[in-house]
Amino acid sequence: MPSPRTSGTRRFLGALATALALVATTGGTGAAAPAAPAGLREVMFVGNNWDGTADVIASRGDFHRVARVNVIPDKEERLREIYLNPVKLAFFLGVRTGPGEGHDQFVDDMYATPDGSAMVVSRPSFADVVSLDLRTGRINWRFPVAGYRADHMAVSPDGTRVAVSASTANTVHVLDIATGRQIGSFKTGDKPHENVFTSDGLLWNMSIGEVTTALDAPWLDWTKGDRRITVVDARTFETVRVIDMRERLDAFGRGDLSDAVRPLVFTPDEKKIYFQVSFFNGFLEYDVDSDRITRLKNLPGNPATDPDRTTWVNDSRHHGLSISPDGDKLCVAGTMDDYATVVDRETFAQGPLVPASKPYWATVSGDGKSCVISESGADRVTAIDFATGRRVTSVDVGDHPSASGSPGSPPTGRARGG
């Protein structure tokens, strides 16, 4: 079985494929579905952030689209609540003008329940997490997060719990994936972002600080807030470890780099982490046991992109990482430089630069042979062969794909950014 950090797909019952097709063709009206065929099938969710849908695509082969699911069936009700509350409205419009680039953010992360019957979605602009019945399209449960914006999620290795970042409340909630009941929560640094469960019973959260200001010069980095990695016991939610990458970057001789840790991936043995930071075209290697940064890979910049870092969306430059199931290759989304590339993990030798329009996450195909990236600037996803580093295929999806999710059970995780 692939590492909990590597694969972007999961198996799920054939009944789900039928239910998904029904949702796509009937709009989730609750009409009866035909009998499901026997057997298993793999798919991948693609979250279309700006139009509030999730495309369901094959997880290997030609990656064709299977269905499209509406993840905001309660849009009118949510908007009515927001417009009647001046504080909620202010934050709602703030998300639109800030991280949303003039658009509402309706989907960030998605996962399915272990039995494949429901999709769990974090919705930034609505500051909530919902479970959607994949046969009817209706909402099973809704959990409003603390504060005013929901962000990245992660699913526990056994598929029973989902962790979600409440980015304006500096809090991570951990929910029962079947009922939406909160099991626990913990405090983080400023603007919690990525969450990762590890096999040793820990939950890692990376806070990235303020990313919407124009105070982006290196000497103003201190204005971005308290950025740190918070590691907690995944059962008790007690803090086990806090990692301040500022200290580690300084010790490595790169005090010029931001300490806002963006996407990261673990090696299959979970002894090393590869991570991206704000404004940097490349990634770093961190040794978990020795607690130090050990290597850095600088990737090419794109002369065609604007060198003014204040123009890079949400302090990104390269934002999206995945790792092959064997741990030999890294796939890097060079977001603001408009390419993706595969890097040999041992030598750090890079493959060809595959042109891509603002790729904003990276995950792994069901067979483990390909890296799959979003192209949020072109409304498509693209598969890149880990072995050759070359494009396999591209598939059109909805407006501004910027998240990946994986249906089914058992959970095998994913690595991405957005």
Image (cartoon, grey):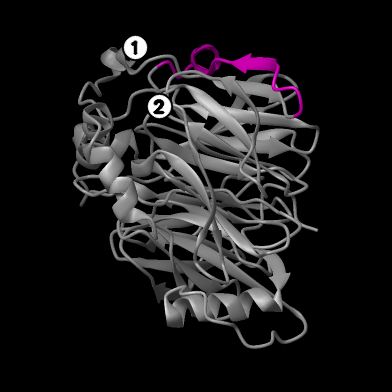
Quadrant of the drawing holding the C terminus: top left
Which of the two discs, 1 and 2, labels the residue nearer the N terminus? 2
Badge number at residue 325: none
Of the pair 228 and 169, the residue shown nearer to us? 169
Q: Residue 239's x, y, as percent?
A: 68, 16
Q: Is residue 143 above or below residue 18?
A: above
Residue 178 shown in magenta: no
Q: Is residue 36 above or below residue 173?
A: below
* 66 sits left or right of 308 in the view: right
Q: Is residue 298 visible?
A: no
Q: Residue 180's x, y, as percent?
A: 61, 43
Q: Residues within 10 Å of mark 2 (few under 14, many from 20)?
A: some
Q: Residue 65's x, y, as percent?
A: 48, 78
Q: Residues within 10 Å of mark 1 (few under 14, many from 20)?
A: some
Q: Residue 289's x, y, as percent?
A: 75, 23
Of the pair 238 and 248, the residue shown nearer to us? 238
Badge number at residue 222: 1
* Marks 1,2: beta carbons within 8 A: no
In this figure, which residue is indicated by the disc labeled 2?
147
Q: Is residue 197 above or below residue 217?
A: below
Of the pair 166 and 82, the residue shown nearer to us? 82
- Mark 2: which secondary structure? loop
Q: Is residue 305 above or below residue 254?
A: below
Residue at figure coordinates x 23%, y 34% from the top left = 89
Residue at figure coordinates x 63%, y 88% from the top left = 34
Quadrant of the drawing holding the N terminus: bottom right
Of the pair 2 and 82, the residue shown nearer to us? 82
Q: Which residues are magenta?
A: 235-255
Which of pointers 1 and 2 indicates the residue nearer the eye?
2
Type of amino acid under label 1: Trp
Type of amino acid under label 2: Gly
